[in-house]
Amino acid sequence: MLSVKSLNKWANAHTYYPLDLLRIALGVFFFIKGIGFAGQTETLLALLEPLQGFGGTMFTVHYVASAHLVGGLLIAFGLLTRWAIVAQIPILIGAILINFVGDFSGPMLLEAGIAFFISIFFLFYGSGKHSADYMMKMES
């Protein structure tokens, strides 16, 4: 099994600016989604309506908004990228599954699917050479 250190070495040897821009765009996407969910909690509650019987709805609403806000910033700056993406994965899986449990929305499914696959890529790739993680590692 590959270790995080070997994944980081591979990512730093194969880093490109378009991948860094994609990571930054993913972080900005999550941050904007977090602002939207924080400002319109009733929209998120309406999305979670098919899951009303399972409990924990208000916890989920607060988790989604805060994880998107904080995680989006961390991903955009390349700081603790893998940990921030691990916090996003359950949200993205829920966003994909919501389309099959509740009202189906093709654009929302496509948006969640693309974000999920890009997040999985960066979960393995890491933050890359042009990131806060790399700069901090080089300073120490």
Image (cartoon, rainbow, N blue to C red):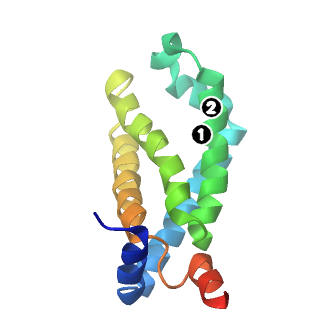
Residue on which the image places disc 2: 61
| 14 left or right of 86 in image | left
Residue on which the image places disc 1: 64
What is the distance, in whole Å, between disc 1 and disc 2 at their CAs? 5 Å
The kind of residue tagged 2 is Val
Point 60% across, 55% down: residue = 71
Query: Residue 52 at x, y = what percent?
Result: 52, 14
Q: Secondary structure at mark 2?
A: helix
19 w.r.t. 57: above or below = below
The residue closer to the viewer here, 69 or 84, is: 84
The kind of residue tagged 1 is Val
Can residue 43 be seen at all in this image of the molecule? Answer: no
Point 62% across, 85% down: residue = 135
Can residue 116 be seen at all in this image of the molecule? Answer: yes
Considering the image in quadrants, where does the N terminus appear?
bottom left
The residue closer to the viewer here, 53 or 82, is: 82
Point 37% across, 65% down: residue = 124
Query: Residue 132 at x, y = what percent?
Result: 62, 78
Q: Are marks 1 and 2 in contact (CB under 8 Å)?
A: yes
The residue closer to the viewer here, 130 or 111, is: 130
Query: Residue 140 at x, y = what percent?
Result: 67, 86
